[in-house]
Amino acid sequence: MKIFLKKTVSFSALLMSAIVFSQIGFGTEILEPTSAFDVISITKDSYSSKVKTISSDAFRLTSDCAVIQDSWANDFETNTDCWTVINGGDANGWKSYPNSEPGGGATSYGIQYGASAHDDYLISPVFTVTDFVSNRLTFDARNSSTSTAEIIDIQVWNSDMSLLLETLAAGVTPGTAFQTYVYDLSAFEGQDICFAFYIATTNQYYIFIDNVVVDSATSLGIDEGNLLSDFSFSPNPVNALLLIKAQAPIQSIIVYNMLGQPVVRLRPNTVNTKIDMSGLQVGTYFVKVSVNNTYKKVRVIKL
């Protein structure tokens, strides 16, 4: 689709351009998210209102991206639609590179060393975090050197990048072979977020990102007992404090009421923790616990 606009664009000029555009027979339509369209200038005869010239110096724009509502993936092979690069430091910012290393595709996104400090972000599309749909982030990363290794942080931001919600991991330093990293996003369920690969190093070498996937971790359903393979919880029924013990650090805990609404969120990152349920109403609740990137949900009775 092509839209013909005047070079000096105001709201009234935009309307006039749309009228001329319609008059010359191309029709109009509503742009879908991420639709590409060309913008070129026209000159109109002030007396006859006929189009005199149409420029050949078109430039291409893309409409805004829609918020992703499902699981998604990007290996940077065919496109980087809705990814954003912010380069606030050295001139060498995030960009695509050919890749021949096992574990990655033909193209990876990477960043090159610079004599000045990086202050650079590779930012994902905005998506809604949904339980059992899009609450896990997985990606592969590698360095070109271990002696001059690049270091990145994995950050979660709100949809317009105005608020840093959490740093999922700081100082991530992969080896020279692609390594897979997995992060739990369940603490952000119901929110529109994006994540960023942030780098602030100086004069290191190269680091590459590939095979980004946002999906859901395996759910093992509701366990009616008090002992699971990865963690135990007690007492049940509970009056005030629910004690949870795990064999590995607990990544996240979310307590839901019977309407499916989250009423308690925790990210303890410890093997033992307590949930204060004293302020909750009497009734049945579901406690979802993430251990080793696997979700398990248990039913708890609050007295």
Image: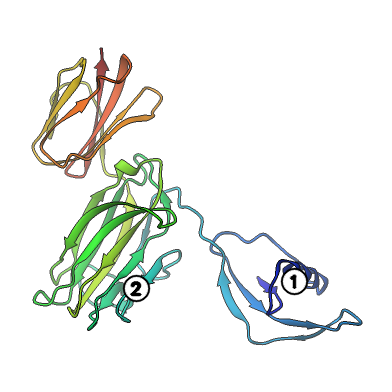
Residue in view at x 17 percent, y 78 percent: 204
Q: Residue 281 falls in which quadrant of the image?
A: top left
Q: Quadrant of the C terminus?
A: top left
Residue in view at x 19 percent, y 80 percent: 203
Residue 19 point in image, percent of width and height = 80, 68
Q: Disc 1 to disc 2, how far (Cα)?
A: 35 Å
Q: Residue 293 falls in which quadrant of the image?
A: top left
User: From the viewer's perspective, is 240 left or right of 56?
Assistant: left
The colouring scheme, among rainbow, by chain, secondary structure or one colour, is rainbow
Q: Quadrant of the N terminus?
A: bottom right
Q: Is residue 27 above or below residue 272?
A: below
User: From the viewer's perspective, is 222 left or right of 179?
Assistant: right
Residue 100 point in image, percent of width and height = 24, 77
Does dot 2 land on a helix, a strand or a loop? loop
- Which residue is more in the foreground, 70 or 259? 259
Sooner in the amino-acid sequence: mark 1 or mark 2: 1
Does dot 1 land on a helix, a strand or a loop? helix
User: From the viewer's perspective, is 16 left or right of 152?
Assistant: right
Q: Is residue 190 above or below residue 19?
A: above
Residue 148 point in image, percent of width and height = 12, 77
Q: Which residue is mark 1?
A: 13
Q: Amino acid at mark 2?
A: Gly
Q: Which mark is residue 140?
A: none
Residues under numbered marks 1 and 2 in contact, where contact means CB atoms less than 8 Å apart: no
Residue in view at x 21 percent, y 77 percent: 206
Q: Residue 291 falls in which quadrant of the image?
A: top left
Q: Residues within 10 Å of mark 2 (few under 14, many from 20)?
A: few
Residue 3 point in image, percent of width and height = 68, 72
Q: Amino acid at mark 1?
A: Ala
Q: Which residue is mark 2?
A: 88
Q: Residue furthest right?
A: 48
Residue in view at x 57 percent, y 64 percent: 63
